[in-house]
């Protein structure tokens, strides 16, 4: 069983990381479109064209299901891709619903952080309208954070200062839930933790997406008896180039290690 996992960059590794825990039997192909990251600063049409290319590449590699491990790509392109490709395509969107539900205990507010494309997209607006009947959800775009992540800069003074400046007009003590509406933001959980109250809950969609992927491949007969008990493999592509050198693989290993630490927060 071959599964494609796509992101504009290293953010999607957080989804792959969780998928490998939830469904270790699969052979994964991870595709990060590093030649074109960040997507969050492009137009919807530009994003759609790039994701279309990457999904076509993964289909040609034999993937039987594809995860768009990118809120921005999901927001801009999922309907188009589902019409065009005849295989299951699973998207990710900010986990607004569970975050709003959790506030019934705290009585406090929800902040959704994302890229600018996701923040101004129709998809997120509809999602917030659907669940925010108490008007407690604020959406904040953090345009530079994806670039920091791509530069392996996760908790430096620069990152802290950037976050502080973006949150300047908010009273962070008002929030009990922070929705990570961009997969790249998983790398910054320790930086967010320093700025928000101690009881902050950070909600990402990764477990939900991994469970959704597993249910989907079972339902579609992609996960078969022959896969049970198998130990899957992973191939990594940066745009259309396969990552193979020891230095590249070491870097990916380090990113997985960081993601594992962030997963425990
Ligand atoms: N990781 C992507 C997301 O979840 C966005 C990154 C980008 O701006 O390229 O939205």
Image (tube, rainbow, N blue to C red):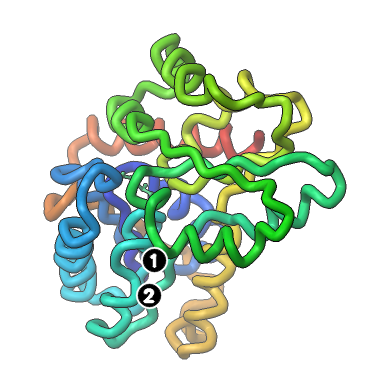
Q: In the rendered image of this protein, does residue 109 appear above or below residue 16?
A: above
Circle 2 packing at 10 Å, graded few (<14), some (14-19), many (20+), is many
Please tell me in which quadrant of the rendered image residue 112 appears.
top right
Q: Position of residue 91 (x, y in %)?
A: 43, 66
Q: Residue at x 38, y 31 (%)?
A: 145
Disc 1 within 8 angstroms of ligand 1 (CB) = no
* Circles 2 and 1: CB atoms closer than 8 Å: yes
Q: Position of residue 31 (x, y in %)?
A: 26, 55
Residue placed most toward the observer, 195 or 153: 195
| Disc number placed over residue 89 in the picture, else none | 2
Relative to residue 253, is residue 21 drawn left or right? right
Q: Residue at x 58, y 45 (%)?
A: 179
Q: In the rendered image of this protein, does residue 59 appear above or below residue 263?
A: below
Q: Secondary structure at mark 1?
A: strand
Q: Residue at x 49, y 70 (%)?
A: 230
Please tell me in which quadrant of the rendered image residue 11 appears.
top left
Circle 1 packing at 10 Å, graded few (<14), some (14-19), many (20+), is many
Q: Position of residue 102 (x, y in %)?
A: 77, 51
Say whether residue 70 is visible.
no
Relative to residue 244, is residue 74 drawn left or right? right
Please give the residue where the numbered disc 1 appears in the rendered image: 67
Q: Quadrant of the C terminus?
A: top right
Q: Residue at x 38, y 80 (%)?
A: 88
Relative to residue 102, is residue 229 drawn left or right? left
């Amino acid at each position: 069983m071959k599964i494609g996992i796509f992101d504009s960059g290293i953010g999607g590794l957080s989804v792959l990381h969780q998928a490998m825990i939830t469904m270790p039997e699969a052979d994964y192909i991870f595709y990060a479109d590093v030649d074109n990251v960040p997507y969050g600063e492009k137009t919807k049409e530009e994003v759609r064209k790039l994701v279309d290319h990457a999904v076509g590449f993964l289909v040609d590699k034999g993937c039987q299901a594809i995860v768009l491990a990118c809120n921005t790509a999901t927001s801009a392109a999922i309907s188009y891709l589902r019409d065009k490709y005849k295989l299951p395509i699973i998207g990710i969107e900010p986990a607004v619903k569970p975050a709003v539900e959790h506030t019934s205990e705290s009585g406090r507010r929800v902040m959704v952080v994302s890229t600018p494309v996701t923040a101004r997209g129709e998809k997120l607006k509809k999602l917030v309208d659907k669940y925010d009947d108490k008007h407690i959800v604020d959406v904040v775009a953090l345009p530079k954070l994806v670039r920091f992540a791509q530069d392996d800069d996760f908790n430096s003074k620069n990152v802290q200062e950037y976050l502080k400046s973006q949150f300047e007009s908010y009273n962070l003590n008002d929030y009990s839930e922070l929705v990570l509406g961009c997969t790249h933001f998983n790398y910054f959980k320790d930086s967010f933790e320093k700025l928000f109250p101690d009881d902050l809950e950070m909600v990402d969609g990764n477990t939900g997406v991994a469970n959704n992927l597993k249910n989907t491949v079972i339902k579609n007969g992609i996960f078969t008896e022959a896969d049970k008990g198998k130990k899957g493999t992973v191939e990594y592509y940066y745009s259309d180039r396969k990552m193979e050198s020891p230095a590249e693989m070491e870097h990916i290993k380090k990113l997985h290690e960081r993601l594992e630490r962030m997963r425990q927060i």
